[in-house]
Image (tube, rainbow, N blue to C red):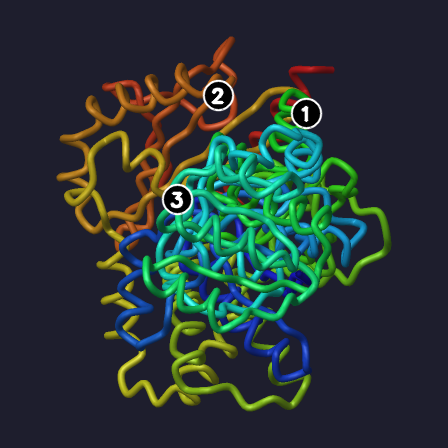
């Protein structure tokens, strides 16, 4: 089963409005160029982003938690399957027709796996001579016997089941009759006298080899006591052997089956295969059979193709990104530590929003932008630039936002901008622990793992009342996740300032960067609105100086 391999366009972990909307719009632009591109997100939508998407009727991107390869990325073998009621003869034909086949999944009526039957199971059954005589460990329907022997029902009711003994009529009539009881099956040739003698014993089943003609007298005798007469083109030896193949698969299949799910990580699958040592393994999707993997298959997946937007640092990328083939990066942040195995297209611009870069790609490629996409890109620019209050704002952002507002038919851009910013003010809607994780980015400063979280607020006084709870949540977050330093920005959009909490600083590092702390052990940073431009750069320089 060949898997499709779309290009996933995805932003950073803990996605914000800019990363989500940029991924959606850039995926659309790539599709116009003929690429199977699909937007994705690397985490839960925050309230602001959800407001924007719902406001303009845009579907949220698919959630991708990791890019570690799973069985979904493997070309499964879609071999034949059987039902529990099919015969061993029919399974045997499958093995003969397909030499690769070592086992066959047995499916129930709902598409689930009831068991599995292997070549070894059939071989073992074939060499158990005693099982021929009594259909040991199983029974079968008369219809299965007829189908297996490629026979013809001459008379009798074939809807019942057979579970008696099998006799081969090679001895004298009386000797044979002494060993036959009602319910038995006798394989016999063209000896009419013996046929009549056996039919006088009660209801039995006669299997006549080499398509032996049935006389009127024999037919009447069979009809008198409800016996069955079946003719087959095979000789006695072959008939005896083939009857053993007429039992249902259900009596021979293994029901204790090791299965996998398409969502299982490939490394976990490999480890389990080594331990289990079976021939093959059915693979399921939501309980439904999808295909098979076996020990001989090379479990090497197609590398997932991705385009990264609004980030370029490994610490901010979705888990498993190193297992993918990165095709492009569109970003407006500092260069981080991602490496690629081949040259790729990178568009890195010092603007306030990744959405600005995406929107200008539409213009450069002369692709009309649909109104809903223009609207969400406008909102993304507003969100990342705090409606042009952030120092990261450039004239390009303003000009782009004006074009997007016009393309989207937004009558009052400022009113919409205020709605977006109010939707992003989550102070009273989330718990302190959730606020810390709402918009958090991770940075690696030479082995020191640092996070900077940020929320926008519209009422600084209300926010200051919650500082003790937020400080406690920040300390607990750092201890649980093992970071060296965690910062939390409460950014007053209208007042154009930030209150900064910290956890884990050493040797007054932050005092040297941000000045004297306020009573309550936080920093008041007037004019500071940007994590990217006003927090990370001075912190980077201070850490460098400390390490030198």
Which residue corresponds to mark 2?
Answer: 485
Query: Relative to 269, is 308 above or below?
Result: below
Front disc: 1 or 3: 3
* Left or right of residue 363, residue 93 in this image: right
Quadrant for the N terminus, please: bottom right
Instruction: Tell me whether circle 2 and circle 3 mark residues in contact (CB < 8 Å).
Output: no
Q: Alpha carbon of mark 2 to alpha carbon of mark 1: how far?
A: 47 Å
Pick the residue in front: 9 or 508.
Answer: 9
Q: Residue at x 26, y 64 (%)?
A: 51
Which residue corresponds to mark 1?
Answer: 277
Q: Residues within 10 Å of mark 3 (few under 14, many from 20)?
A: some
Mark carried by residue 183? 3
Front disc: 2 or 3: 3
* Left or right of residue 399, residue 491 in this image: left
Q: Alpha carbon of mark 2 to alpha carbon of mark 3: how far?
A: 83 Å
Give the x, y percent position of residue 185: 49, 46
Q: Residues within 10 Å of mark 1 (few under 14, many from 20)?
A: few
Q: Quadrant of residue 410?
A: bottom left
């Amino acid at each position: 089963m060949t898997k499709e391999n779309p290009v996933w366009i995805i932003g950073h972990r803990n996605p914000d409005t800019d990363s989500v909307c940029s991924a959606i719009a850039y995926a659309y632009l790539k599709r116009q160029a003929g690429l199977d591109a699909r937007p994705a997100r690397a985490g839960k939508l925050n309230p602001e982003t959800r407001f924007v998407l719902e406001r303009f009727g845009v579907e949220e991107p698919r959630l991708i938690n990791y890019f570690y390869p799973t069985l979904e990325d493997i070309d499964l073998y879609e071999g034949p399957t059987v039902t529990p009621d099919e015969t061993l003869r029919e399974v045997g034909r499958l093995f003969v027709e397909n030499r690769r086949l070592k086992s066959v999944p047995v499916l129930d009526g709902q598409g689930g796996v009831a068991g599995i039957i292997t070549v070894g199971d059939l071989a073992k059954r074939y060499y158990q001579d005693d099982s021929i005589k009594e259909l040991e460990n199983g029974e079968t329907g008369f219809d299965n016997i007829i189908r297996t022997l490629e026979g013809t029902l001459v008379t009798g009711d074939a809807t019942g089941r057979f579970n008696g003994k099998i006799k081969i009529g090679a001895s004298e009539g009386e000797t044979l009759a002494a060993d036959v009881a009602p319910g038995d099956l006798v394989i016999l040739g063209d000896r009419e006298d013996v046929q009549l003698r056996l039919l006088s014993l009660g209801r039995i089943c006669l299997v006549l080899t080499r398509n032996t003609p049935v006389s009127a007298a024999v037919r009447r005798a069979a009809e008198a006591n409800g016996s069955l007469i079946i003719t087959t083109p095979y000789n006695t030896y072959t008939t005896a052997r083939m009857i053993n193949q007429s039992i249902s698969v259900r009596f021979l299949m293994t029901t204790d089956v090791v299965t996998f799910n398409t969502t299982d990580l490939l490394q976990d699958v490999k480890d389990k295969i080594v331990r289990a040592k079976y021939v093959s393994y059915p693979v399921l999707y939501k309980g439904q059979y999808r295909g098979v993997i076996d020990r001989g298959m090379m479990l090497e997946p197609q590398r997932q193709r991705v385009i990264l937007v609004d980030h370029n640092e490994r610490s901010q990328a979705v888990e498993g990104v190193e297992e993918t083939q990165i095709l492009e990066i569109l970003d407006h942040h500092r260069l981080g530590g991602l490496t690629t195995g081949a040259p790729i297209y990178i568009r890195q611009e010092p603007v306030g929003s990744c959405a600005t870069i995406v929107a200008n790609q539409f213009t450069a490629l002369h692709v009309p932008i649909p109104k809903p996409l223009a609207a969400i890109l406008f909102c993304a620019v507003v969100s990342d630039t705090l409606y042009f209050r952030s120092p990261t704002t450039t004239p390009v952002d303003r000009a782009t936002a004006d074009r997007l507002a016009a393309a989207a038919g937004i009558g009052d851009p400022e009113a919409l901008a205020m709605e977006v910013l109010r939707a992003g003010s989550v102070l009273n809607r989330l718990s302190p622990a959730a606020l810390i994780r709402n918009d958090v980015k991770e940075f690696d400063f030479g082995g020191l793992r640092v996070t900077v979280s940020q929320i926008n607020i519209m009422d600084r006084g209300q926010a200051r009342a919650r500082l003790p709870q937020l400080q406690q949540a920040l300390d607990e977050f750092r201890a649980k996740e093992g970071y060296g330093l965690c910062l939390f920005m409460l950014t007053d959009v209208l007042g154009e300032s930030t209150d900064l909490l910290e956890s884990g600083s050493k040797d007054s590092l932050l005092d040297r960067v941000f000045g004297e702390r306020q009573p309550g052990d936080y920093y008041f940073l007037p004019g500071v609105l940007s994590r990217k431009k006003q927090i990370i750069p001075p912190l980077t320089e201070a850490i460098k100086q400390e390490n030198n």
